[in-house]
């Protein structure tokens, strides 16, 4: 969430924590979980001696027709071994040797799977072996996922949302934890697109919060969530916190993800080069915080273009990428955070940096031009025409409230939209979260100040487990029409007071039609729109 909440909290890298320190933190988290929730909320216990354990579950990411990444975290040094099979019985398996997991990556690791059959259900199990004695192995942890189809007629269906454990609303055992994860799991999508704010590193989780009607919201808590994250260990702890939820672990074991980041993986409304004026932070240089946050992100999220190797805060690779999901779909994962210029009133008449940076914009135009998929989903971590503020005078997203010709970051988006029109690139759809409500905007040149583009849709859905907020104003530079919106009337409603939201995209293999459904927790479809294939604009 990019808007500040009044009155509510939101140099050199520190040393990598010793194995004993990490274990103590993990044990404390599990103890807190069991004490707070018990029963179904109890995470698998860590063994103090003996064999390695994978109590944080498994997850898969960036799955294509023939490849994918499997993630796990151990409670101690271990060798990661992955076996895949066509059946849940694992009668015939293919073995994939994984990395050695150690304190340098907080005992996390991913194993790349290749040569997988297209359009098939893959069953896998992860075994952790003692590096000094491979015969000593932990209990295998199993999962499953579907590879992307090679045949168009198979179709594709996925979900998207974002904003998890935000605004002080954490894992509440009284309501069943992150309930939307279980609802999404039952829909059994091909994959889940997490549109940013996968954690709230700047969001303190208090044990209890009193709601306006007097009810008590009760949170599971951990030491890392008692303050804003600054150290690498604290950022890692924020990722571990979300994995304490049994719904999230079950979802991760069944549904692969495509994940991007936004601001709260580091801190609210951050941009490169920012120096903080915030008493909660002893480290004021946001670039230092962002380096630690990106390291933790690369360790805890299976992203094909990010690699956490060695010590310190070094991360190889980049967040933006294309995930090609068969002949019907390419997902263009954008990074609207790492390359942006400083938040400002956004009235510059010349802005080559914008929100994507010149290099990422050139990459996006090049990859869009190369794409042969029927649909090109632009996975944006921020909306285009919704006015998102940063303080009294600055703006956080693209729009800056001036309905006239493009200025500031709008110039870069205008260049991209012009490129799509003139290259006659068909099937572009924008998906995002960030603003903590759900809506559908149709952009058309006849309503716009800038008219050199083809019509397109932008769909917003979220939060998945955070506070709800009123709808943002629209900026008419690109002519948005808010066709649908569902949002609370006051700021920061808890998940006990307002539904959580996620979206569904269903691409029919026969007709090629793309149907978007905006869903609310509880099984409700609030809005549905069918888009036709092969069009430059609609």
Image (cartoon, rainbow, N blue to C red):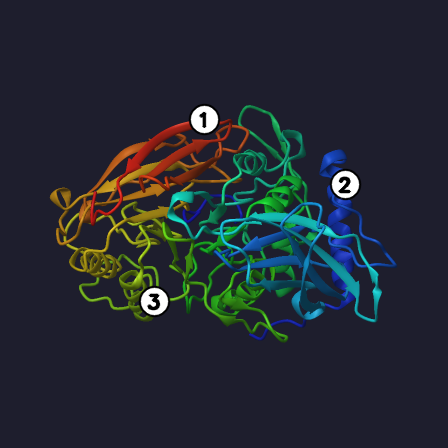
Furthest-top residue in view?
213
Q: Helix, strand or loop at disc 1?
A: strand
Question: Where does the image place residue 316, in percent across and percent down from the top left?
Answer: 52, 73
Q: Where does label 1 land, which residue?
A: 524
Q: Residue shown at 37%/42% (left/top)? A: 509
Query: Which disc is residue 311 wearing?
Result: none
Note whether residue 157 is visible: yes
Mark 1 Cα within 10 Å, few/some/many (few <14, many 20+)? few
- Left or right: residue 326 versus residue 289 is left
Observer-nearest of 274 and 456: 456
Against 160, residue 68 (above or below) is: below
Rounded to the nearest angstrom, the CA distance separating label 1 from label 3 is 37 Å
Q: Residue shown at 43%/36% (left/top)? A: 491
Rounded to the nearest angstrom, the CA distance separating label 2 from label 3 is 44 Å
Question: Where does the image place residue 125, in percent across and percent down from the top left?
Answer: 69, 53
Question: Where does the image place residue 362, in percent across and percent down from the top left?
Answer: 29, 68
Q: Helix, strand or loop at disc 3?
A: helix
Q: Where does label 3 land, which residue?
A: 360
Marked residue nearer the N-terminal end (1 or 3)? 3
Q: To which quarter of the image does residue 133 belong?
A: bottom right
Rounded to the nearest angstrom, the CA distance separating label 1 from label 2 is 32 Å
Quadrant assignment for the C terminus:
top left
Q: Helix, strand or loop at disc 2?
A: helix
Q: Where does label 2 land, which residue?
A: 34
């Amino acid at each position: 969430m990019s808007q500040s909440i009044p009155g509510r909290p939101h140099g050199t890298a520190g040393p990598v924590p010793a194995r004993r320190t990490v274990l103590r933190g993990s044990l404390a988290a599990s103890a807190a979980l069991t004490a707070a929730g018990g029963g179904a909320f109890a995470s698998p216990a860590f063994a103090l001696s003996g064999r390695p354990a994978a109590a944080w579950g498994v997850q898969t990411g960036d799955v294509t027709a023939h490849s994918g990444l499997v993630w796990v975290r151990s409670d101690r040094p271990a060798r990661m071994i992955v076996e895949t099979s066509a059946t849940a019985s694992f009668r015939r398996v293919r073995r994939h040797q994984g990395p050695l997991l150690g304190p340098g990556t907080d005992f996390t690791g991913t194993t790349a799977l290749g040569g997988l059959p297209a359009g098939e259900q893959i069953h896998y199990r992860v075994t952790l072996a003692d590096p000094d004695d491979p015969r000593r192995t932990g209990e295998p942890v199993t999962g499953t996922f579907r590879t992307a189809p090679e045949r168009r007629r198979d179709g594709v269906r996925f979900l998207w949302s974002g904003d998890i454990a935000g605004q002080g609303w954490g894992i509440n055992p009284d309501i069943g934890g992150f309930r939307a994860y279980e609802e999404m799991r039952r829909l059994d999508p091909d994959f889940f697109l997490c549109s940013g704010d996968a954690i709230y590193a700047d969001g303190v989780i208090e044990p209890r919060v009193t709601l306006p009607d007097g009810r008590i919201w009760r949170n599971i808590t951990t030491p890392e969530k008692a303050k804003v994250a600054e150290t690498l260990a604290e950022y890692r702890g924020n990722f571990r916190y979300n994995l304490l939820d049994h719904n999230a672990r079950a979802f991760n074991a069944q549904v692969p993800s495509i994940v991007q980041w936004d601001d709260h993986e580091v801190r609210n409304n951050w941009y490169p080069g920012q120096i903080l004026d915030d008493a909660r932070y002893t480290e004021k240089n946001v670039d230092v915080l962002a380096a630690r946050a990106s390291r933790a992100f690369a360790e805890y999220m299976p992203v094909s273009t990010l690699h956490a190797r060695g010590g310190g805060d070094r991360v190889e690779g980049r967040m933006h990428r294309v995930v090609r999901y068969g002949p019907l779909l390419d997902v263009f994962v954008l990074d609207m955070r790492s390359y942006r210029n400083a938040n400002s009133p956004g009235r510059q008449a010349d802005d080559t940096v914008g929100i994507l940076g010149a290099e990422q914009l050139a990459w996006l135009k090049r990859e869009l031009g190369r794409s042969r998929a029927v649909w090109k989903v632009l996975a944006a971590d921020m909306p285009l025409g919704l006015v998102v503020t940063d303080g009294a005078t600055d703006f956080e997203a693209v729009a800056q409230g001036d309905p006239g010709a493009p200025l500031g970051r709008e110039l870069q988006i205008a260049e991209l939209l012009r490129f799509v029109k003139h290259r006659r690139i068909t099937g572009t759809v924008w998906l995002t979260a960030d603003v903590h409500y759900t809506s559908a905007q149709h952009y058309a040149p006849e309503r716009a100040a800038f008219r050199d583009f083809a019509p397109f849709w932008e769909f917003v859905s979220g939060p998945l487990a955070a506070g709800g907020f009123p709808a943002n104003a629209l900026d008419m530079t690109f002519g948005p029409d808010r066709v649908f919106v569902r949002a609370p009337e006051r700021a920061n409603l808890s998940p006990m007071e307002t539904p959580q939201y996620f979206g569904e995209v269903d691409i029919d293999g026969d007709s090629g039609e793309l149907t978007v459904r905006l869903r609310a927790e509880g099984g409700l479809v609030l809005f549905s729109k069918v888009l036709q294939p092969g069009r430059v604009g609609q």
